[in-house]
Amino acid sequence: MAFQKHILCIGAGYVGGPTMAMIALKCPQYKVTVVDINPRRIAEWNSDLLPIYEPGLDDVVKTARGRNLFFNTDVEKGIQEADIIFVSVNTPTKTFGAGAGMAADLQYWEKTARQIRENSDSPKIIVEKSTLPVKTALAMERILTSDSKVPFEVLSNPEFLAEGTAIRDLENPDRVLIGSRETESGLKARAELVAVYANWVPKEKIITTNTWSSELSKLVSNAFLAQRVSSINAISALCERAEANVSEVSRAVGMDSRVGSKFLNASVGFGGSCFKKDILNMVYLCRFYGLSEVADYWEGVVKINEYQKERFVMNMLQAMFNTLAGKKICLFGFAFKADTGDTRESPAIFIAKRLCEERAHLMITDPKALDNAKTDLKGVVGDIEYVADPYTAASGCDAIAVMTEWKLYKELDYQKIYHSMVKPAFIFDGRNILNHQTLFDMGFNVFPIGKPPLTHFKRES
Ligand code: NAD
Ligand code: UGA
């Protein structure tokens, strides 16, 4: 069959893989190829065990793979053949030189731009899918058009999917954002990309802006989401002192339709590969433009998140009589959120390291993230075991700390777990997902986030 369009995606990660799988599923008339420099990742995309766990992803890939969805490592051939090239390479925080720890590391991005220029002999639309600092499209245009034989048009089309719900988010997005130059060729390229999404996304949900608004909107969206989590987490600390209940507060506040109820769950802190990276990227940008008050404001969101993780560890330490040395602590979950095996920036990494510093003995369990946990904690000095079964992991422990809101942790037989633990037995619910009163009645000493603890100890006089 002759395909109407050839779409290429460079970068077969958490975004490139699922996003292209959805385009291929919804648009059988296009050939969609995903390339990556990592041959292992590509081999996994071509196997029955995909490189990422994402509910619903297997079915989408199985339907389209081999029909109009292809994964390979031939980046150059892919570029030559493509009409539209999505770039979805990683853009981590820079770890060296100017802007280290704040700015985005654009080396993978720039290499891709040069590779596109060198292998193109027909006009192409380049789509920024990665999250990037504002004005990156300008840099890309400059690289592409210097000494080039063919015209390129650069669009910004940030991705808003969340891990764990990626397929649902891609199938039914709140919005698709496309930014372009407002020139004749820019508007034409924009219309072409709108036509791709219009295969399944209602027209009114596809919004178009100038390129810089689009690039910035992505950073701002993540900053606003993270800000809500830090806001409620800051209030959780106040609730613990004031004997208020953070769930009741967030319910009362969130019922104001101007505020809204989502993203107000107090937690052990936000994780994931993007919130911290994107906020720091924006902070760096503000400082670059001399907007130090604006930079400080947004940096506060990250600072509260660090504070929340440290506060959790200190609460454990204090509750367990100011020593964790030699005590066995079971971490329920290691992924940064439920329904993913991703552990990038997971609060569990920080907490595990801190507990090791306190010389606790860790038992880590997670239904999907144990391999990543082993990699994250490689080289950490301490006594750490990885156990798939939560009952075995908790047995013989002094405490359980819930790190990830996996549904399975709500459904365990806690009576059985209680009997297998050292007494006094503690539960620190870093996600507020358990039934605290029931656990207390079983004999546990329960420490939720942002709520008074339920303990069997006599009050201090
Ligand atoms: P990832 O690390 O999972 O995937 C990136 C892939 O790009 C890797 O497989 C890497 O090998 C590949 N790559 C790097 N340089 C390459 C090159 N020159 N040629 C070919 N392949 C190359 O990253 P991700 O989580 O998919 O994120 C990608 C981008 O999307 C980032 O900018 C991120 O901020 C953004 N984003 C991520 C999410 C998410 O949920 N993870 C959501 C929205 C946006
Ligand atoms: C987030 C955004 O939600 C996506 O829109 C965006 O595309 C993506 O970042 C990105 O750019 O990478 P993601 O990080 O996958 O998606 O997951 P979220 O659901 O946003 O959760 C982020 C973190 O916040 C998790 O650790 C989660 O547990 C935590 N969180 C979330 C809370 O602690 N409380 C809440 O109420 C909500």
Image: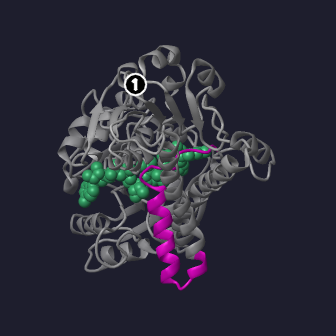
Q: Is residue 36 left or right of residue 215?
A: left
Residue drawn where x is 52% and y is 57% of the image: 307
Name the spot of residue 93 as percent of width and height, x first.
37, 64
Residue drawn where x is 53% and y is 40% of the image: 430
Q: Is residue 42 left or right of residue 354?
A: left
- Is 436 magenta? The answer is no
Task: Write the start and end of the magenta stretch as one range.
Answer: 265-294
The secondary structure type at the circle numbered 1 is: helix
Name the spot of residue 398 as percent of width and height, x first.
42, 30
Name the spot of residue 160 as percent of width and height, x first.
52, 51
Asked where in the image residue 118 lies, by quadrant, the reply is: bottom left
Residue assigned mark 1: 394
Q: How many marks?
A: 1
Residue drawn where x is 21% and y is 37% of the image: 43
- Is 273 magenta? The answer is yes
272 in relation to 44, above or below? below
Residue drawn where x is 53% and y is 68% of the image: 299
**Amino acid bearing label 1:** Ala
Name the spot of residue 260 as percent of width and height, x first.
74, 47
Asked if one can make out residue 79 in the rendered structure from this viewpoint, the answer is no
Label 1, ligand 2: CB separation under 8 Å:
no
143 in relation to 191, above or below? below
Asked where in the image residue 82 lies, by quadrant, the reply is: bottom left
